[in-house]
Image (cartoon, grey):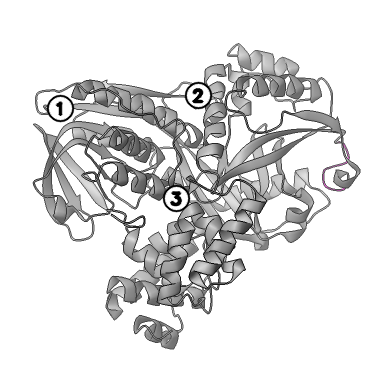
Amino acid sequence: MSAWQLPFVRPASLAGRHFSTVIVGAGINGVGVFRDLSLQRVDCLIVDKGDFGAGASSAPSRMIHGGLRYLENGSFSLVAEATRERNLLLRNAPHLVRPLKTVVPLANFFGGLMSSALKFFGRTPPQRTRGLLAVALGLRLYDLLGRRQRVMPGHRISRVPSADRGLFRAAIRWTATFFDAWISHPEWLILELIGDACRDQPRSAAANYCRVMGCAGNILTLRDEISGMLVRVTADTVVNATGAWLDRSAAVLGGAGPRVMGTKGSHLVLDHPALRDALDGRMAYFEAVDGRVCIVYPFLDRVLVGSTDIPVEDPDQIVTEPAEVDYLIDVLREVFPNMAFGRGDVVYTYVGVRPLARSDADKPGQISRDHSVVVDPPNATRDIAIVGLVGGKWTTFRSLAEEATNQVLQLLGRSRTASTELLPIGGGAELPADAAATERFADKMTAASGMGRARALALLGRYGSKALPLAQRLAASGDVPLQHAPDYSAAELSYLCLETGVVHLDDLVVRRTLLAIRGLVTDAALSEIAGVAAEALGWDAVRAHNELCACATALRDRHGVRLQPAAAGEEPSFNASLMASSVLGQA
């Protein structure tokens, strides 16, 4: 298997196969289990009814953090775990996870002490903005709990720097500064984990758009969501890692419930150069007037704003509502009163459902973000146990996966042989450690491929150390930038289509690239990308047109992308000549 050959399969190839473990749900937690079990040489199948990481795992705040605000709920063990896992991700995936300097604006000294104390003891306090003393105590504890594997400086508190006096409202007197981390492309880390898993255990396999229909005896029935084909596999154990869909999946598998509830979190991506420049690489972490903790930070060449926290019943029926957009824009106006904000600044929206353990808490923010592993034993119709992952957050996926893997190994009568704790992920292995080493690596890439330095550095930022063999491959194919999306080439998109399990156009546009979230998808760009995908995947003109229309609808309706609307009763009208030439491979 080459470094770039990821063993994604369609369900037809699975018929009649046996796996020691079948994992249902290919979000970050399920993929974490897939990678850990495969490292123990356990043969696994992971399936998802949609694309890999297409649920909540593709819609986080893109922060890798310890959860400073969880301290008020007394969740010390969770914060200690999350800060440790944050530190490990900075070491294990430095190509995707990077330090994030964070500033907390403070307007008073004593505010919030009583509120924090009441929250700690389980009471619902009157809302009051936290002051310097409460934040200082929290950050001191945050640094203490996050000391294991720490690679970043501790916090500090100072008077508002002169450069920031025009950024925050006039009442702000101090700023607290600490470090967390952010992830540039969480969906790609999920794909890298799958690739690492199948390198360690070649008998493992991954199938997206593959729905579990039921479990009887030790037989699982799977349906290919593209062709409708039904296939059957056998297994010794099952892992239910479907997050907010856990109870629904448990019902299909014959497991217990209910165990989870969901709250949706909507985020905005802004094209706002003035705010991005003023933030100067930092995240602003603050409370809105209603007490909701919000974040704003530079995300690549944009600004990311989040998030809402609203209970939902059906995780399949969620969108970012106009009221949520208005709410987040109003928060920006409140915190940064010297800048103008409007809907026209928003280039992308996204929303996910947080999988939380069921709770009677009065407010969503008071529900624990902790996780647990539960086991449903065999029953009258099912001969195998189901291991369920309840709750969890992006940052702690590795530790949750470790706990679930240990449970599966116990059921299989096997022992752990290796740890994921210090194991690099994907392109994080052998990554240049400093600026000088990065320059040398870029020189090596340009010498080996003949591509320019800027392009080499762009690939290095996306794929880490795996960028070197990819650069050689792309150069051999003719690495010509796309006309309407020049950050990518047709050769790079073709690689993504062929070797990362792309089934639909939005898999490519929304999750395999960063074009959509950066607001770079125009009508012309989408047509051009669809043409490349059609040629790579062998779509005929009808399939290409259908994929184009479906992706445009999803971008417009689910993500607020300003694409050309369709007339009543008609499909979207795109550049037909461009589309035709692209499909024929002539673009």
187, 481: nearer the viewer: 481
Image location of residue 179, percent across then percent down: 68, 35
- Ranked by sequence position, the earlier of labels 3 and 1 is 3
State the separation of the CA atoms marked 1 and 2: 30 Å
Q: Residue 384, labelled with which disc?
A: 1
For mark 3, what is the residue?
187
Displayed quadrant of residue 363: top right
State the separation of the CA atoms marked 3 and 1: 31 Å
Q: Residues within 10 Å of mark 1 (few under 14, many from 20)?
A: many
Displayed quadrant of residue 18: top left
Image location of residue 192, percent across then percent down: 40, 48
Q: Residue 368, labelled with which disc?
A: 2
In which quadrant will I find the C terminus?
A: bottom left
Q: Is residue 113 among the parts visible in the rendering?
A: yes
Residue drawn at (38%, 66%) of the image: 495
Q: SS for tag 2?
A: loop
